[in-house]
Image (cartoon, rainbow, N blue to C red):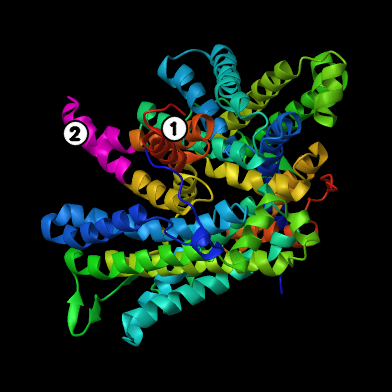
Amino acid sequence: MRIGSAKQSYRVDEALFDSTTQQTWFGVLVLMLAAFPFVANDYWLYLACLVSINIASTIGLNILTGYTGLVSLGQAAFMGLGAYTVAILQIRYGTPFLLNLLAGGVVAMIGGIVVGLPSLRVKGLYLAIATIAAGFMTHFLFSHWASLTGGTGGLTVPPATFLGNELDTSFRIYWFVVPITVLMLFGAANLFRTRIGRAFIAIRDRDISAAVLGIPLLRYKLMSFALSSFYAGVAGGMFAYFFRLVTPESFPLIMSIFFLAAVIVGGMGTILGSVLGAVFMTLVPELLKLIVGWLPLGGNATLVLSPVRTIVFGLMIVLFLILEPHGLAEIWRRIRRVFHLWPFRT
Amino acid sequence: MNVDWLFFLEISLAGLGTGGLYALTGLAFVIIYKATRVVNLAIGDMLMIGAYLFFAFSAGLGLPLWISVPAALLGVAALGALIERTMIRPMLGESPISSFMVTVGLSSILVGLVELIWTADQRRLPEFLPTTPIQIGEAFLPPKIFYGFWIAVSLIALVLLTFRFWRGGIALRATASDQAAAYSMGINVPRVFSLSWCFAALIAGVAGIVVGTIGGLSSTMGVFGLSVLVVVIFGGLDSVLGALVGGLFVGLIEAWAGTYLGGEYKLLATFSLLVLILLVRPYGLFGTHEIERL
């Protein structure tokens, strides 16, 4: 049983890791992440990269939806903006890939600010539906500005190069995708220890009260949109380097729904939730593939898989919202509490 | 520039025809929103279920039209009640965004079910509308769209009359305007909730059968629902009149954009309209502007 820790200053109380236990476990996690590529096979590495990209985008959406309370169904559109920017820069100018990722983030950020503009006048569901429009407009842009985007055929992205090495296998991509995602995680975690992050939370809890407290709503809402879509843009850039192909169909509305679902399943307004949600939502379809493969369906397995996936996807959103609205992060907290308080009951 | 007015008239009429169906589905949406304050993103998929049930009864079981249509409508109404009872009722009192997300999940479940049962292949509904072309003045109109429009219009009229004169309709309006007051006047609010979902599902079912007859069936029919979202945002989420005007207007815009610019401009046009209306009149043409106080 862990007894409460006495904190003697605000600094300690505000620390990102407030106990040595946490620091130790975080160290273990970092070591595991570093060791993973050497023990895992290609399939697992592929999944790890995919999960990592999805985590990056989910954190972005969580900043907007979970922390600022602005529901968005446009995350995939911003990822698309980032991916196309990266692809075009890489193909035409061959600039260093880190610079491209940054540029992708910035372009998506500008897109996010434009989409966020109505957010002062409308909110809640009106805004959610307005963000659906972003997806259609970017899709249109991608498929019709053919001279730049290659039209419906999309763009084939050459692999990123780092110090003369081509990042063309999952093993190599892992080494740049995972650190960037960890960095972005830290960025988000730290954001909510700053003035800006606190303002976001105030806006979520009651925007009019926040305005009364002197938070300029439009500026902070736009800032939230900008940050969120910057994350999406970088994630989209990593997506482009990872799949090496961007087409207008790579970023459908269902993908935006996927990220919103990841935020909900993980837990709105928690950093841990973004990670858990993204991992869970990415791995469940793979698990389903396994299960459907085991079932004695004969040749129908692949035919059944896609609808079953769609149903399970919807069921997860619905069941989590009804039964566990605070998501996986809350389940995790409960487990932790059990260990803290053992042998007493909560 | 030489404008072919006859051609323009024909497209506009066809646009109004589709617009009637948008208005009808928009009406189903507004009923749900008014009664339960749920923005139902799955309206397009409920419409699709109606069409597929009709397909199952008429083409699958070979039942005659006068049995298969009511059977399909009953089925979809029962589904509406089931959805309300299992998914919407538990979300009472949660934030509107949560219940919105539930309908997002629901939409995915319905699409999955349809693909599982009927596969994702395109299907054709049996023809049951007369096929002789309709001539209005000098303009020719596809018969399906013409009859679809009139089905939509008569159903809308029926629904409006029901709201006006039937006890259940009055209960629904009372619940919509003030839930607590309705409760204290002895209205069974949970029943009204069920009723509104049943009713809306039924209306969507009719729209689905007509839309399916015009354009064929596929598991992507839910896209129709996206245009309907634009319709109701345009007219105002809680306005019946708005749904009607918005439906016809969006139908026209889509027809014009689709013909003069190309098919892929259709959704772009509707969504540009959406953004425009949000910037100018955030609560739609006829929606109530909610005043917030601390």
Label number found at residue B111: none
Residue displayed at 57% across by 69% down:
A226
For the residue pair A12 and B277, the one nearer the viewer reads as A12
The residue labelled by disc 1 is A315
Residue displayed at 56% across by 51% down:
A66
Residue displayed at 61% across by 30% down:
B91
Amino acid on which the number 2 mark rests in the picture: Gly
Residue displayed at 24% across by 59% down:
A33
Secondary element type, mark 2: helix
Label number found at residue A293: 2
Amino acid on which the number 1 mark rests in the picture: Leu
Q: Is residue A96 visible?
A: yes
Question: Mark 2, residues whose alpha carbon is within 10 Å: few (<14), some, or many (≥20)?
Answer: some
Residue A202 appears at what percent x and percent y?
67, 56
For the residue pair A31 and A39, the one nearer the viewer reads as A31
Q: Locate residue A329: give its quadrant.
A: top left
Chain for disc number 2: A
Check if mark 1's residue and mark 2's residue have beta carbons within 8 Å.
no
Query: Where the N terminus of chain A falls, by quadrant?
Result: top left
